[in-house]
Amino acid sequence: MTDRTLPEGLHRDTLAVRVALERSQHGENSEALYLTSGFVQADAETSARRFAGTEEGFTYSRTSNPTVASFEQRLAAMEGTEAAIAASSGMGAILMMCMGLLKAGDHVICSRSVFGSTLNLFAKEFAKFGVETSFVSQTDVAEWRAALRPTTKLLFAETPTNPLTEVCDIRALADLAHGVGALLAVDNCFCSPALQRPVEFGADLVIHSGTKYLDGQGRVMAGAICGPSRLIVDVFGPVVRTAGMVLSPFNAWVVLKGLETLNIRMQAQSANALAVARWLEAQPGVARVHYPGLPSHPQHELAMRQQSGLGGAVVSFDVCGADPEQAKANAFHVIDSTRVVSIATNLGDTKTIITHPGSTSHGRLTEAQRQAAGIGQSLIRLAVGLDHIDDIQADLLRGLSTLPT
Ligand SMILES: *Cc1c(COP(=O)(O)O)cnc(C)c1O
């Protein structure tokens, strides 16, 4: 029989459609969906060896499953890490990471601008177990350095952030972490490995919400951690087996197939987003546009270095408004005047999605906290999909050209 193992040195595009467990005896071209909770064993001795871990083989899908393993191998190949481990959602992945790495008395440094549920997980849930977190500026490395302690075990960053697309310097944070023997984890949700591979800049762990661009069509919840085998296999593997934030094989299969088109979607959606961002900058009703692909973005050059020269697919913008009340009315007017884009909570979909962060994802903050985070009532987030650029612009113009101000 010819050797069908993949040769070395394949391009990432090829890995994205090829890396998976070997085919079954049926020779399916599209990877099989093994929707099963348990696996039949040849005999009691085989079963015993597999449970003891002295023989490879599947036993129970909380421990491992062939479809989930295919997703993990493919994502690791795309991120350029030794291994990956799947989780039930992006938050499940961050929980798994914290359970694996942290104990009472440990200290974490985290950007103040990370995803709201991530903030709560550190500030509320893990604080209960005696893990203390310092929240610092997304962009000022000196604040991260000043927060370091002998007990610091983890630096956690997300870049670009939601919804303001602020970019942090992955290399600088990795150097800080390694200087004190800590790890740097980067939430790579907004760029995906198609645009940004944080380990190339020194990050130790990469976090994914597979719910977003990896699936890419808004169908399933999924998450993953990518990193070295010594952490993925030896530290996080036992956590997921014990704690059970396991990815369903069905969801793994959907995301596995999503990875095959990730690169072309990210290229096309980033191009659409850049066109919308440039167009928004020229609209009289728009006060400010936040998009890493624009030269006006404060970390534009850093973003272009880290993100393969692309800005990603999320654009946020402030509409004009004399005071917070007027700004909110104007923002709602623009959102409610759309007929094509979806008013929904998600991003990373082929369908363009519009949201008002100040009354949704950041609605539970006080006005002062929102102001400190730079998320005013005038802010609109657009997660640009594959709708035609002319249709997206016409949809936004309907509201922008009729602002009640
Ligand atoms: C959505 C999101 C998460 C959480 O992922 P879920 O799959 O919704 O649990 C984490 N980080 C970022 C940046 C996100 O956008």
Image (cartoon, rainbow, N blue to C red):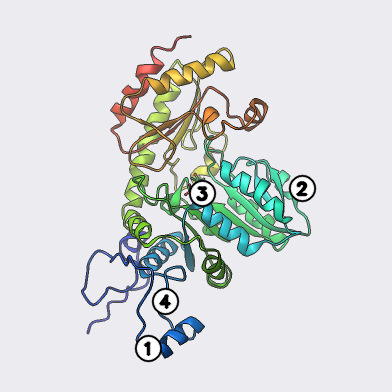
* Marked residue nearer the N-terminal end (1 or 4): 1
The N terminus lies in quadrant:
bottom left
Residue 302 sits in quarter = top right
Mark 3: amino acid: Gln
* Marked residue nearer the N-terminal end (3 or 4): 4
Task: Tell me the number on the disc at residue 306.
Answer: 3
Q: CA distance from mark 2 to mark 1?
A: 59 Å
Mark 2: amino acid: Ala
Vertical position of residue 310 compared to residue 397: above or below? below
Badge 4 element: loop
Q: Is mark 4 within 8 Å of ligand 1?
A: no
Pointer 4: what residue? 59
* Marked residue nearer the N-terminal end (3 or 2): 2
Pointer 2: what residue? 146
Of residues 202 and 399, which is closer to you in this image? 399
Q: CA distance from mark 3 to mark 4?
A: 41 Å
In x, y percent, where is residue 280?
Answer: 42, 24
Q: Residue at x 55, y 23 (%)?
A: 377
Disc 1 and disc 4 in contact, CB within 8 angstroms:
no
Task: Tell me the number on the disc at residue 85.
Answer: none
Residue 122 shown left or right of residue 10 in the figure:
right
The answer to whether residue 198 shows anywhere in this view is no
Badge 3 element: helix
Badge 1 element: loop
Mark 4: amino acid: Thr
